[in-house]
Image (cartoon, rainbow, N blue to C red):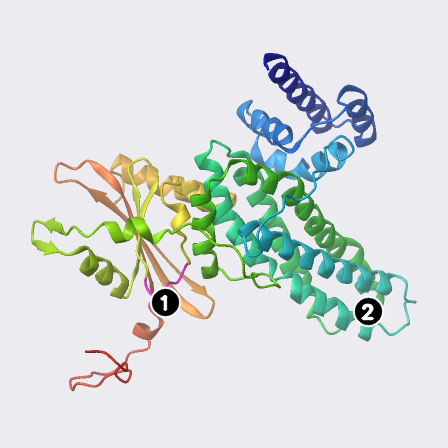
Amino acid sequence: MSELIDNRAQRVRTLKGIIKRLHAGEAPDAVRSSLKELVCQTDYSELMAMEQELIADGMPVEEIQSMCDLHSQVTREVLVQLAPAPLPPGHPVDTLRRENEALRQSAARLQQAMNGVLETADDGDVSALLLEWRQALNELQDVDKHYQRKEHFVFTCLERHGITGPSKVMWGKDDQIRELLKDLSAALREADTTVAEWKLLAATTGAAAASSVHEMIYKEEQILLPICLERFTADEWAEIWASSPRYGWCLVTPREGYQPVDLQAADRASTAGVSLPTGSLALEQLIAIFSTLPVDLTFVDADDRVAFFSEGPNRVFARSRAIIGRMVQNCHPPRSVDVVDRILGDFRAGRQNVAEFWIQFTGRFVHIRYFAVRAEDGRYLGTLEVTQDVGPIRALEGERRLLEYAEPAAAGVQ
């Protein structure tokens, strides 16, 4: 057994050394040749361990993000290709795999349409090809639902098992793909564009988008999902299954067949009330109050871990129970972590007590406030995020002094 462990550690060290040569500017073909000579075969866990060691050694995450497509390309010939593990229909991984297959087909149709444009004469008609291009791109933009479930559920559970590399590297790559698809969509809306300009778009942004989608599918299928299937418990898969509908599905819907463990058993076992300085509430009442508030609450404790969030029917930003206990920095895309750290640092040091933002989000005017939560002696206990759609409030005019319900009474309410 110790010999196997030593061999694995040696392969990880060899992988890391070769990848460092790639980062230093050595040609991919030369690196690939050395890899084939020195490493007969490796598996998904060793590739993941290699990237985590690079991060631990101080290599910036952004640098690994910029090179991770090359990582997968130069290691592809030595990576053990595993047959997909059989799973019941509707298991979260079954759904992710089916979504990936649908995305693969959409990316192929996108590339086929772009190839048609590239082969058209500069004075030719590309209107039919542009229609196919737009339709395929419209399908690919559904990938955001797939990525959000991966980022908020899968990465969270991996971190519980001490695996942080994917959330640091893959999330950044997900954001790059989102930006490529967004830029491509904006360019395709332009009307006065020549065939030559369409060709340039296909050869640059379009090609990068299609390639990036394919590369992420490969990384998920050959690296991410196998390690998840190896590590996650039945409870964790049930947690992911129960929370996933909040984000929706990408191009496919889950199949029937998967039977998760009963997540509600623990909830039903807890019937105790909560005593507060100003009164007491039954647990059922407390849950109902938080669900009724016209604001969304999320509390991050003094160690920067998500400890609680409220579950209202019209939440502005979806939340998953999988984020409980997760470092809040890992709940945000890498590009916004600096702002998160600054707020928490200012609150913890006592320099500030409130930070607020207001943004336009999916047709809503959203007010976001962060409050430092402190004990009576001034100790920092954590940060409370309060989010509210204030569009209806901003639209108010005059006065309302007479009783007038905004909505009819719900049927069956007693």
Label 1's element?
loop
Residue in the picture at 75% in, 67% down: 133
296 sits left or right of 44 in the view:
left
Per the rendering, the mark at residue 314 is: 1
Q: Quadrant of residue 256?
A: bottom right
Residue placed most toward the observer, 93 or 161 = 93
Label 2's element?
loop
Per the rendering, the mark at residue 381 is: none
Chain-order first, disc 1 or disc 2: 2
Residue 340 in percent (x, y) is at 40, 43
337 sits left or right of 278 in the view:
right
Disc 1 crowd rating (10 Å Cα; few below 14, some 14-19, many 20+) is some
In the image, residue 58 above or below residue 217: above
33 sits left or right of 146 in the view:
right
Name the mark nearer the viewer: 1 or 2.
Answer: 1
Q: What is the three-letter code of the residue carrying label 1?
A: Asn
Residue placed most toward the observer, 325 or 240 = 240
Q: Quadrant of residue 136?
A: bottom right
Q: Which residues are magenta?
A: 312-317
Q: What is the three-letter code of the residue carrying label 2?
A: Thr
Per the rendering, the mark at residue 194 is: 2
Residue 8 in percent (x, y) is at 64, 20
Residue 189 in percent (x, y) is at 68, 70
The secondary structure making up most of the magenta span is: loop
Q: Is residue 37 visible?
A: yes
Disc 2 crowd rating (10 Å Cα; few below 14, some 14-19, many 20+) is few
113 sits left or right of 326 in the view:
right
In the image, residue 398 above or below residue 90: below
Q: How many marks?
A: 2
